[in-house]
Image (cartoon, grey):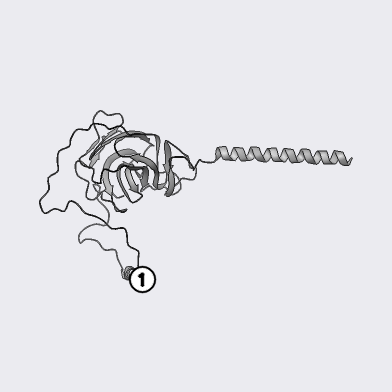
Amino acid sequence: MQALTRQRRRLGTIVWLTTAMLGAATARAQAPDLATPRWVVTDATLPRAASLNADGIDLVKGMAHDPKASFRDGTIEFDLTPPRTAFAGIAFRMQSLANYEIIYFRADSGRWAGVQYQPVWEGETTWQLYHDDGYQRELRRGLTGPLHVKILIAGSRADVYVAGDSMPALAVRELKRSQAAGGIGFWVAGGDDTANANAGIRGLIVSSSSPKLAAASRETHPPEQLLRWRISPRMRRTRSTRRSRRRRTSPRRAPGRSSTPSRRDWST
């Protein structure tokens, strides 16, 4: 009788272990793979039902990056998920999370509405300086749903093609940062949703071939215009600066200017 009892207990233990192992395997199969060989997501907010793999990712906001990409010249090709209200784009030649170049897209009323280039130094965006022809452009109407993007980068030039068009939607006149190889990143900002994905990419392909791009017309500037500058890393707040900020009763802005950007101005 005791032998029969021990045998039943042993059989129960085996059944329990088998059930637990199957449950763990199912959980691993259903859980999002957050340790892909490409994406580092420490500076990004992932949606609740996160899904990312080597050639795609969804973000609420922030930057997911591939620091091992070592991209300088070549082709970056991908599909943007259907537009919501966010800005979404590809960072390239990343030296760090604060120093890179980026080409990004603006969504408006359910369609992809515009594309813009900007260099970033020490985390400071420069969209206010690069919003003219050669750096920013409205997209043609009718671009709803997923958007196929192909970016050709060579030296100080870049051409951006969308939806299989034969002509570039944006011909970047001059890439402003140094032509050093660096990482690749996917960036999202400005979306309304704080828990679900505001934008995503699929089918990311990065090629290091050297495309041949037509030379762009040179910019002309007044001789007194400042064209090159350097920005220091952000300084730590001190007690005096914190006290000074607390004493302010209203945000400072230029007289006669609205604090809300105009439709032409893109906020990042």
Mark 1 residue element: helix
In which image quadrant can residue 102 be found?
top left
Decide: is 167 above or below 195: above
In the drawing, does residue 6 fall left or right of residue 15?
right
In the drawing, does residue 100 fall left or right of residue 22?
left
Q: Which residue is mark 1?
A: 239
**Residue in the image at 24% along x and 61% along y:** 253
**Extreme-left residue of the structure:** 223
**Camera-side residue: 30 or 122?**
122
**Camera-side residue: 214 or 259?**
214
The answer to whether residue 242 is seen in the rendering is: yes
In which image quadrant can residue 245 be found?
bottom left
In the drawing, does residue 241 fall left or right of residue 155?
right
**Residue in the image at 25% along x and 28% along y:** 166
Decide: is 182 above or below 207: below
**Residue in the image at 21% along x and 42% along y:** 174
Q: How packed is label 1: few (under 14 Cα within 10 Å), some, or many (20 or more)?
A: few
Amino acid type, mark 1 = Arg
The image shows residue 134 at horizontal and vertical percentages of: 20, 41
